[in-house]
């Protein structure tokens, strides 16, 4: 009688894994060919500038939200040279509302570098692309595969989820060691002849079939060999080991009006919303009480010896960031003489339309009819 050894069992498992991987890749591409109807304006694009632009916009942003921004950017800046030579404030204004403004700063820096240091030609190798400011392994792989047909697998949230579920991988996807494991697996599964097609297919599959919540397992093309589905682990995978603890911040903005102008400044500190504009700010550690919001108390927080009138206090506003909850109120107030306040300058209400503000401020201004 034949005796099974541990070595033989390992060979059998290895063969099964190879078969499993071939099944995954072939059925994914079959789904992409027959059933993938997901539409996006950058899909199928081979221009590296347009691919790069779409990927930067989509970082931390839903496709539905990024779609309009992508189209507007291309209309105003059809080439990377146009973007590089544009006034930075114009670019920030166009970005307004997308959040994560470091992306916009990196976009500008990279556009200028390619234009002035690379003759306006987008780099054509993975390593050169990865070296650009604001570009990580995922974005570099996306540009390399979509624009230059280079065999680099993308690894974003959708891909992590699809791979983790299909192979029932319980390694935490936010762990560095696990990320290396997933990267190796993703590159093994990649169709080296058609990397761009494969990369788009797996991201689309994660977005429309293997969704974070309520995945469409009944119509999934991979369901017959999906280990998480077989083992009843769909809702437990992927695994994360870190929890985001959000910090609450309380911002009170004073719109001090004198001679039909309001005082603003550009945020220059290494904090949220760097390079965006804001009104006179007082930040406190906890929400002000109703007693603290009385006009006579609010006036005391303003600099100088001025006389104020027509004080209007807004409702409470909220903006959620990845690691912070921002709460704010706006105090619209008239001054009888100019303010002597360092860092702020008076601008007309008409000019506010040209300035880029954080979302919490733009929402307030729009609701008040101050900036439309």
Image: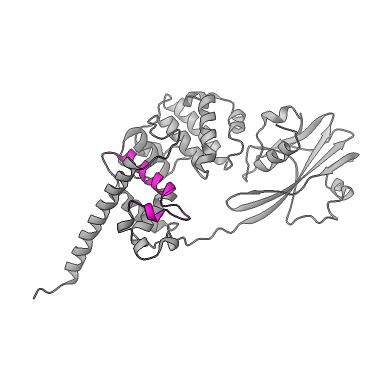
Q: Does the magenta stretch include residue 362?
A: no
- Up-down relation of residue 15 to residue 358 (above or below): below
Report if residue 133 is visible in the image. Answer: no
Q: How many marks?
A: 0
- In terms of depth relative to the viewer, which is nearer, 187 or 201? 201
Report if residue 236 is visible in the image. Answer: yes
Residue 26 at x, y = what percent?
27, 47
- Up-down relation of residue 130 to residue 235 (above or below): above
- In terms of depth relative to the viewer, which is nearer, 55 or 223? 223
Relative to 179, 289 lies left or right: right
Relative to 299, 215 lies left or right: left
- In terms of depth relative to the viewer, which is nearer, 144 or 26? 26
Q: Residue furthest toward the bottom?
A: 1
Q: Which image quarter: residue 362? A: top right
Report the residue at 55% width, 58% height from top: 244
Residue 306 at x, y = what percent?
89, 39
- Considering the image in quadrants, where does the C terminus appear? top right
Q: Which image quarter: residue 348? A: top right
What span is in magenta?
A: 194-221
Residue 365 at x, y = what percent?
73, 37
């Amino acid at each position: 009688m034949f005796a099974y050894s541990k070595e033989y069992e390992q060979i059998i498992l290895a063969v099964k894994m190879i078969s499993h991987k071939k099944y995954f890749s072939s059925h994914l591409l079959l789904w992409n060919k027959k059933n993938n109807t997901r539409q996006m304006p950058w899909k199928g694009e081979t221009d590296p500038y347009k691919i790069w632009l779409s990927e930067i916009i989509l970082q931390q942003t839903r496709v539905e939200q990024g779609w309009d921004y992508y189209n507007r950017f291309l209309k105003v800046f059809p080439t990377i040279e146009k973007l590089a030579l544009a006034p930075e404030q114009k670019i920030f204004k166009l970005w307004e509302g997308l959040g994560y403004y470091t992306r916009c700063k990196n976009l500008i820096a990279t556009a200028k570098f390619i234009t002035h240091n690379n003759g306006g030609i987008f780099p054509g190798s993975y390593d050169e692309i990865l070296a650009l400011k604001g570009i990580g392994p995922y974005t570099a792989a996306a540009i390399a595969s979509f624009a230059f047909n280079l065999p680099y697998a993308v690894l974003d949230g959708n891909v992590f989820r699809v791979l983790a579920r299909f192979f029932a991988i319980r390694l935490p996807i936010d762990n560095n060691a696990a990320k290396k494991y997933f990267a190796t697996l993703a590159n093994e599964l990649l169709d080296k002849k058609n990397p761009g097609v494969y990369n788009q297919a797996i991201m689309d599959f994660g977005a429309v079939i293997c969704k974070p919540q309520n995945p469409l397992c009944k119509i999934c093309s991979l369901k017959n060999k999906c280990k998480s589905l077989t083992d009843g682990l769909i809702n437990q995978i992927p695994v994360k080991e870190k929890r985001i603890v959000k910090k609450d911040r309380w911002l009170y903005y004073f719109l001090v009006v004198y001679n039909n102008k309001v005082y603003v400044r550009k945020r220059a500190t290494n904090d949220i919303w760097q390079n965006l504009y804001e009104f006179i700010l007082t930040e406190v550690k906890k929400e002000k009480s109703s007693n603290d919001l009385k006009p006579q108390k609010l006036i005391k927080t303003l600099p100088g010896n001025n006389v104020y009138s027509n004080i209007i206090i807004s409702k409470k506003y909220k903006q959620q960031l990845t690691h912070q909850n921002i709460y704010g109120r706006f105090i619209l107030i008239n001054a009888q003489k100019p303010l002597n306040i360092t860092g702020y300058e008076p601008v007309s209400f008409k000019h506010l339309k040209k300035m880029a503000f954080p979302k919490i401020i733009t929402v307030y201004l729009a609701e008040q009819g101050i900036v439309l």
